[in-house]
């Protein structure tokens, strides 16, 4: 059984985002499980705990997805004969109120919902042979878990090339595992105010940059295992050797190709074409047109990370 949080029909985007912070939604499911290519658990943690950043406008990707939702729903009805109706309610699970759902459509006369998607032709292969991208599959399973419906249709418009419809049926084992991961994420991280553990991904780096800005001059004691540090140094050396080997391999191919743009062996093909790019000479602009530099220059700030071994003679 679900409870309605709010009718989202007349909410502003800022208000909608504030309600989204109340729990884990369908588009959060893959990140909560550590299975999203676009967002790490750490980034999701910050989404739920950090102040909402005001944006001038939504991204083009989100705008197109929203604008084409009606069209995708219409195409679904044309293809299947099944009528659908919009559901504007944001709902939450009665047992775990932090599990929330904001579905696209309900299928009339059937215990089912419809999720509408749009995608670039470049990711069409992700839908090949009946497949569904894992982020979307978990999103649908999450909605089924919260609403209790037994089936979710997912319709995806592949711009300019295809229209795809998939069906996902209720699966006790998968939904139980998904709920367990989501409950663990919320209770162990969000409620306790603990950032998820590092996972080595660039997405985690982005989360760290967002969370910690630096500036404190005080040095702190680091409780780091000596074996872990030694392994870090060893791995750095191994990586350096591997990168040197790969660079040498590439240089040998470039030497063999000379001025040729293309090369081919029994096992692979190589493209080595000249390319041109235009870059602004910011130093010259600053000197010759300081007013333009001042108006359009954008200051960025970053933190440089460096580990230096402490030697006995230091």
Image (cartoon, grey):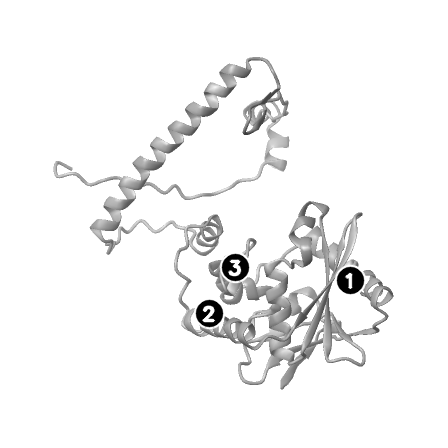
Q: Quadrant of residue 8?
A: bottom right
Quadrant placement of the N terminus = bottom right
Label 2 to label 3: alpha-carbon separation: 13 Å
Separation of disc 1 and disc 2 at Cα? Answer: 30 Å
Answer with mark 2 or mark 3, whichever residue precedes in sequence: 3
Which residue is located at x 69 percent, y 52 percent? 61
Q: Residue 244 in the image: x percent, y percent?
A: 38, 28
Q: Position of residue 307 (x, y in %)?
A: 29, 42
Residue 159 percent location from the top left of the image: 77, 50
Query: What residue sits 38% from the left and 49% below the top?
Result: 215
Secondary structure of the residue carrying numbered label 1: helix
Residue under label 1, please give it: 69
Q: Please report whichever mark, 1 or 3, sits nearer to the chain's N-terminal start.
A: 3
- Name above or below for residue 278 compared with residue 168: above
Q: Using the image, tell me which numbered label, if any, was put on residue 185.
A: 2
Q: Position of residue 140 (x, y in %)?
A: 64, 69
Count neighbours of disc 1 (C-alpha within 10 A) and say few if under 14, some if 14 to 19, many if 20 or more.
Answer: many
Q: Residue furthest top?
A: 259
Viewer-side label of 2, 3: 3
Give me the disc on residue 35.
Answer: 3
């Amino acid at each position: 059984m679900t409870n309605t949080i709010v009718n989202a029909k007349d909410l502003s985007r800022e208000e909608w985002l504030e309600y989204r912070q109340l729990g884990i939604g369908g588009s959060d499911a893959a990140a909560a499980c550590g299975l999203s290519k676009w967002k790490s658990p750490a980034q999701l943690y910050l989404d739920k705990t950090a102040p909402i950043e005001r944006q001038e406008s939504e991204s083009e990707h989100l705008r197109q997805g929203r604008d084409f939702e009606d069209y995708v729903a219409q195409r679904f009805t044309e293809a299947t004969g099944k009528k659908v109706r919009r559901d504007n309610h944001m709902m939450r699970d009665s047992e775990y109120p932090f599990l929330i759902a904001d579905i696209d459509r309900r299928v009339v006369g059937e215990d089912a919902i419809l999720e509408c998607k749009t995608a670039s032709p470049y990711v069409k292969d992700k839908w090949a042979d009946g497949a569904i991208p894992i982020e979307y599959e978990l999103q649908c399973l999450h909605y089924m878990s919260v609403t209790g419906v037994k089936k979710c249709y997912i319709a995806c418009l592949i711009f300019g090339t295809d229209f795809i419809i998939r069906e996902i049926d209720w699966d006790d084992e998968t939904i139980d595992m998904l709920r367990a991961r989501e409950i663990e994420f919320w209770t162990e991280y969000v409620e306790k105010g603990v950032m998820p553990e590092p996972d080595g991904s660039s997405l985690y780096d982005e989360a760290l940059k967002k969370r910690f800005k630096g500036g404190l001059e005080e040095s702190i004691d680091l409780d780091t295992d000596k074996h872990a540090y030694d392994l870090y140094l060893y791995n750095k050396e191994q990586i350096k050797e591997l990168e040197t080997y790969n660079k040498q391999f590439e240089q040998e191919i470039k030497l063999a190709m000379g001025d040729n743009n293309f090369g081919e062996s029994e096992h692979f093909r190589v493209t080595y074409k000249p390319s041109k790019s235009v870059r602004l000479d910011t130093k010259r602009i600053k000197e010759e047109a300081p007013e333009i530099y001042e108006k359009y220059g954008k200051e960025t700030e970053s933190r440089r990370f460096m580990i230096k071994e402490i030697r006995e003679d230091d």
